[in-house]
């Protein structure tokens, strides 16, 4: 196992600024493209990250810390951001994400003040027994998953434009 | 085709600041991990990006603009950064990348001052006839490929730490 709180926080704290550097100033054609019908565009990915920071990670962590395994935590709706489409700009969304993430990492540090908290267990409605350290690791990898998704969406847009170079570009190789 | 010079430049110009936001301040355990034997760590990926900006993209573009298809351009050694290991810090490497990329995007803008330049063709030693617009598109997707690689390397480090959540995390699904 590689998890430590301090290294997990390095990633969680830098994700908003990474996304800001990456996405601020991109034209709408980049922000609105997706990987085909039924897939998310970049704006929808950012809304999903905001939603997770609002309703998933910290609420579940608090649920484990107070309830343990006594009852499963409520399922998280991974698609709720797709209803009630908002008209905010990318800059506004990135700003909201930065604010809520800063709030949440501060909260995380206050909740986990002891290595022993990391071993506490809760009950995931589908996955069964999970540990606090697994939840926080998953939060980190969830950030990375969606960063990878954004990169893949953008690369996909140039799939035909790269011509014969396609075969050298790993990101254009579809997962099996 | 989706390529436009201005949108390609949006990505090429932001990559250094994206990497800086993402990687500055990460501890050595993040920067030195890789995806297994024979794979690159994050430092090596950054050195490869520097190498490409030094010896690949602009030199090849100039070669096409002056030589056309009259002779194939010299092959690019994609592994040269792995020889002569340097002892620079990540911050120094990111700074070097930012400097050379700024120089190169300025150069790119001065070389391509006309849509017609984009249709000019050269001869790739392995791929055959390639267009300027394909070369520049490939430069963009090459940035994205290596950003995706960095994200994947980091996620891989927590493969076991996420416990049962692994099945929900797309970035941990190995390509086929």
Image: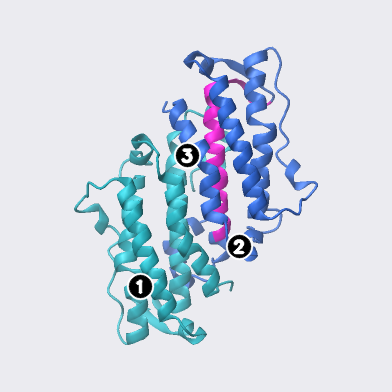
Chain colours: A blue, B cyan
Indicate whether residue A121 is drawn in magenta. no
Part of the protein shown in magenta: A126-154
- For mark 3, does the 10 Å Cα neighbourhood hold few (<14), some (14 to 19), or many (20 or more) residues? many
Residue at the image position 49 percent from the left and 15 percent from the top: A114
- For mark 1, does the 10 Å Cα neighbourhood hold few (<14), some (14 to 19), or many (20 or more) residues? many
Q: In the picture shown, does residue B111 fall above or below A19?
A: below
Q: Are labels 1 and 3 assigned to the same chain?
A: yes
Secondary structure under tag 2 reads helix
Cα distance in 3D space between marks 1 and 3 = 32 Å
Residue at the image position 67 percent from the left and 20 percent from the top: A63
Cα distance in 3D space between marks 2 and 1 = 24 Å
Where, by quadrant of the figure, is residue A87 drawn? Answer: bottom right
Q: In the picture shown, does residue B24 fall above or below A6?
A: below
Q: Name the residue furthest right.
A: A84
Query: Mark 3 highlights which residue?
Result: B155
Where, by quadrant of the figure, is residue B170 drawn? Answer: top right
Q: Is residue A45 left or right of residue A148?
A: right
* Closer to us: B21 or B115: B21
Cα distance in 3D space between marks 3 and 2 = 25 Å
Q: In the picture shown, does residue B126 fall above or below B45?
A: below
Residue at the image position 56 percent from the left and 21 percent from the top: A110
Q: Do the residues bearing badges 2 and 1 touch, measured as CB atoms within 8 Å? A: no
* Closer to us: B15 or A32: B15
Secondary structure under tag 1 reads helix
- The label on residue A30 is 2
Q: Chain of mark 3?
A: B
Q: Are labels 2 and 1 assigned to the same chain?
A: no
Q: Is residue B77 left or right of residue A27?
A: left
**Between tags 3 and 2, which lies in front?**
2
Query: Mark 1 highlights which residue?
Result: B58
Q: Chain of mark 2?
A: A
């Amino acid at each position: 196992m590689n998890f430590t709180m301090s290294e997990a926080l390095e990633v969680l704290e830098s994700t908003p600024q990474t996304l800001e550097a990456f996405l601020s100033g991109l034209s709408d054609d980049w922000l609105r493209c997706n990987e085909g019908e039924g897939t998310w565009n970049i704006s929808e990915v950012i809304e999903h990250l905001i939603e997770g920071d609002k309703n998933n990670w910290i609420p579940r962590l608090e649920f484990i810390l107070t309830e343990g395994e006594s009852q499963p935590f409520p399922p998280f709706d991974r698609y709720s951001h797709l209803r009630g489409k908002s008209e905010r700009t990318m800059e506004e969304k990135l700003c909201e994400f930065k604010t809520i993430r800063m709030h949440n990492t501060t909260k995380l540090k206050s909740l986990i003040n002891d290595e022993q908290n990391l071993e506490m267990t809760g009950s995931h409605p589908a996955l069964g027994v999970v540990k606090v350290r697994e939840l926080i690791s998953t939060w980190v990898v969830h950030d990375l998953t969606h960063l990878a998704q954004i990169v893949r969406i953008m690369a996909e847009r140039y799939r035909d434009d790269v011509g014969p170079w396609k075969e050298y570009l790993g990101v254009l190789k579809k997962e099996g």
